[in-house]
Image (tube, rainbow, N blue to C red):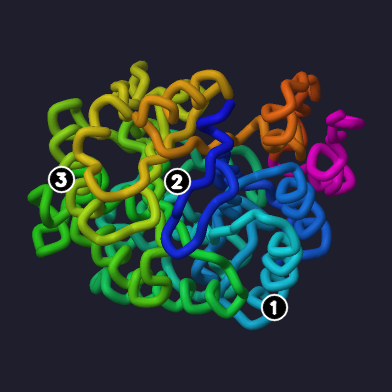
Amino acid sequence: MPSLFSPLTLGSATLSNRIGMGAMTRNRADASTVPNDLMKEYYLQRALGGCGLIISEGTLITRQGTEWPQAPGIWNKEQIAAWKTIVDAVHTTDTKIYCQLWHLGRASHPEAPEQILAGEPVYAPSAISARAGGKFRFLPGAPGYVTPTEVEDPTTLIALFKQAALNAKEAGFDGVELHAANGYLVHEFLDSTANKRTDKWGGSVENRARFGLEALKALIEVFGANVGIKLSPTGGYNDIGMPLPETVETFTYFIAEADKLGLAYIMLARYLPVLDVEVDGKLRATQHDVVATYRPVVKHTNLFANGGFTAVEAEEMVEVGTLDGVFFGVPWITHPDFAKRVQHGKLLDNVPDWTTFYGKVETPAQLGYTDYPAWPSYE
């Protein structure tokens, strides 16, 4: 795999290879959303396993709540200090690590423990609830999503992203990734089915793109060129998605404008059935080939993709210049040495335990997390 294992300049850093570990919610932080030693072990295992760039799991920028219990945050000093121990451990290897900055928007719930502590409503671009999903483990049954409160001044949320970036920098992260995918806050602003505003933050493509672009600029003020963004143009998850012509128009504009900002990378998530939902008897996603559709738009920025790649497919796309690198998810969960296995032609023989991917309160947290074995020897 010579192309995957060639170095890549990313922002102000050089990656040792082009095999990244995408952000994956794992729910092993402390109950108070503070990262811990078990998380440090998990990230260090994968850094030692040859990963070029790790993107942290979705990291909450505010106490405003979450649909996932024990997801980590980065809004206070205790969290910053805990993340620093993880980043420092990763930096004992050749691996770089970015912090994915996450705000759930309308996908949060007013009865989430952190939401209650915050004393604030669930904010979104418009007062429109998601119609599919909303099974919260801290609530019985599947109550569904609530109708959010329309945020009066979106710049207050952009300020939260900027402060989170400052906190990530204090923790020593090499950069940050803006989570603009999967029907969360930034994606909600982009999508006309979730954003019905009539001010400068809604309506036209340019107005709907404004929030994400301004958030990127705020992060660049902190990290310079060491900023990436994750996009999922096919939608689906969390009841998001527009008709195909509007989808292509919206994301073509957004990606073209983001491409002008001097980012480290743009990452496109491909369609995955597991992230699609059914609404009114129909699948919600707008299926299309995101790499083929938006590759021509990206002129100045490294382009990554993720979503069901094999190493062979990733090598082929990097070799011909379609992509500059590929992020993997599940292979990194089940194989802490995924990159080394690819490099040395070893089998990917660890069987995933789907019941522990997002943690189980009644089982030890390390199960399905830090106990997947590495290959015994690479000789």
Query: Could you tell whether 330 is left or right of 99 in the image?
Result: right
Q: Quadrant of residue 163?
A: bottom left
- Magenta stretch in the rendered image: 358-379
Query: Could you tell whether 71 is left or right of 8 in the image?
Result: right
Q: Is residue 33 above or below residue 202?
A: below
Query: Could you tell whether 247 is left or right of 237 in the image?
Result: left
Q: Residue at x 28, y 34 (%)?
A: 241
Report whether residue 67 is seen. Answer: no
Amino acid type at mark 2: Tyr
Q: Which mark is residue 253?
A: 3
Q: Quadrant of the N terminus?
A: top right
- Callout 3 secondary element: helix
Q: Earlier in the sequence, mark 2 or mark 1?
A: 1
CA distance for labels 2 and 1: 33 Å
- The percent position of residue 32, horizontal first and vertical second, equals 71, 69
Report whether residue 112 is seen. Answer: yes
- The percent position of residue 116, horizontal first and vertical second, equals 56, 69
Q: Would residue 297 be counted in the magenta stretch? A: no
Q: Would residue 368 be counted in the magenta stretch? A: yes
Q: Quadrant of residue 357?
A: top right
- Callout 2 secondary element: loop
Residue corresponding to mark 1: 81
